[in-house]
């Protein structure tokens, strides 16, 4: 994310925070001097103003540990698993659902009510609007809603018609023109695991092999997908809606294609760690992060998305995905070698 995009995001969150501070300010008692440890997979630029507001209201200092985009969520998840015997973290703020469910299955979170999901963004195809044309691509599923992902009408008469399905990305006309994040980590991995269930193992494996043979760009993260498309080196990419909107704020010539049943809704999650060193502060932070106010702030800067209809995307059977995780991960490692 560029410095311009970071500045815009910080300014937007700060303005919203200031507007609600007088209403939500707590005036009872002295603020606590405690601290709480947060492992955070949400983008640092979006998270820090929200955490600062929590500290201002409660007096509880948040010691946040962030992760890199290349291994986001996976790196923090592995750390939580390694620390199960002696937890160092109180709260986990995840940016997708699958790894949180994996951690819950492994007993990382307290029981019951160990974690919650809130808000959502979506997986999308992003296109270079200078080269991909055809029918208008206004996203009717979210049109008219605050926080909706903008899908501009694409220019007619352009050389290339956008793909109508992920299945088309294996066609020869997209050879060397597709960009995806390396599919062993993050939301790309989760999406591909969900597609395996949606299409069936045989069809999914065939598609993965054909996509790899079509020589896609394998990026370090989803924001690099958007940048590759914006530079014209790739014509279409598979990425997250928030990364597309970040690129648009920077003035990049990219647009999201409409959500489809092959795409995936990606909620944020918040989990309280079993044996958290600061349980009371952990509960307060969890309540803050899952509040309607925080969700609205994240929607306002397109970190979350509003207006995507229920049932418009994949509906994974999460226990089955968890059961098959090792097998499908091994297949992805075999196919997408770097």
Image (cartoon, rainbow, N blue to C red):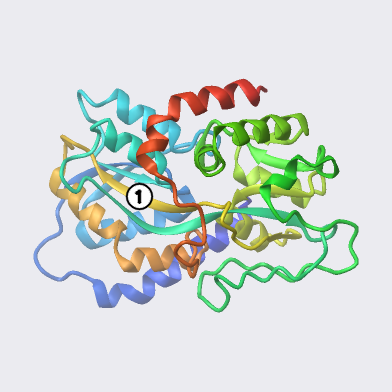
Question: In the rendered view, would you say 24 is above or below 179?
Answer: below
Say whether residue 193 is visible: yes
- Give residue 108's quadrant in the image: top left
Rendering coords of residue 74 (x, y %) = 44, 33
Question: In the rendered view, would you say 110 is above or below 84?
Answer: below
> Which residue is drawn at the image coordinates 57% and 42% (left, top)?
199
Q: Quadrant of the C terminus?
A: top right
- Give residue 244's quadrant in the image: bottom right
236, 52: nearer the viewer:
236
Rendering coords of residue 132 (x, y %) = 82, 58
Give left or right: position of 213 versus 276: right
Label 1: how many Cα within 10 Å (few below 14, some 14–19, many 20+): many
> Which residue is drawn at the image coordinates 78% and 67% (left, top)?
154
> What residue is pinned by disc 1?
269
Rendering coords of residue 174 (x, y %) = 81, 43
Say whether residue 40 is visible: no
> Which residue is drawn at the image coordinates 66% and 22% (left, top)?
337
Name of the residue lying farthest toward the left: 29
| Label 1 SS | strand
281, 27: nearer the viewer:
281
């Amino acid at each position: 994310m560029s410095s311009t995009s970071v500045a815009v995001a910080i300014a937007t969150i700060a303005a919203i925070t200031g507007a609600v501070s007088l209403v939500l300010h707590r005036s009872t008692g002295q603020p606590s001097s405690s601290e709480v440890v947060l492992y955070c997979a949400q983008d640092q630029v979006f998270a820090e103003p929200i955490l600062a507001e929590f500290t201002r209201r409660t007096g509880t200092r948040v010691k946040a540990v962030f992760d890199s985009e290349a291994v986001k969520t996976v790196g923090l998840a592995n750390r939580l698993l390694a620390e199960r015997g002696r937890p160092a973290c109180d709260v986990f703020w995840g940016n997708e659902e699958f790894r949180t469910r994996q951690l819950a299955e492994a007993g990382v979170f307290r029981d019951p009510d160990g974690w919650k999901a809130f808000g959502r963004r979506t997986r999308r195809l992003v296109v270079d609007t200078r080269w991909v044309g055809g029918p208008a691509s206004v996203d009717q599923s979210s049109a008219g809603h605050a926080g909706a992902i903008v899908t501009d009408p694409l220019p007619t008469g352009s050389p290339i018609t956008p793909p109508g399905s992920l299945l088309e990305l294996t066609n020869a006309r997209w050879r060397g023109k597709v960009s995806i994040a390396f599919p062993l980590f993050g939301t790309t991995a989760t999406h591909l695991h969900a597609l395996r269930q949606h299409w069936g193992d045989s069809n999914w494996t065939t598609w993965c092999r054909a996509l790899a043979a079509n020589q896609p760009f394998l990026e370090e993260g989803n924001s690099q997908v958007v940048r590759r498309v914006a530079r014209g080196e790739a014509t279409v990419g598979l990425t997250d809606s928030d990364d597309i909107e970040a690129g648009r704020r920077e003035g990049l010539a990219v647009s999201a294609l409409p959500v489809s049943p092959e795409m995936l809704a990606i909620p944020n999650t918040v989990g309280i760690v079993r044996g958290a060193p600061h349980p009371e502060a952990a509960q307060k932070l969890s309540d803050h992060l899952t509040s309607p106010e925080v969700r609205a702030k994240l929607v306002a800067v397109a970190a979350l998305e509003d207006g995507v209809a229920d049932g418009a995307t994949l509906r994974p059977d999460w226990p089955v995905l968890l059961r098959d995780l090792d097998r499908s991960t091994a297949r992805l490692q075999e196919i997408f070698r770097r």
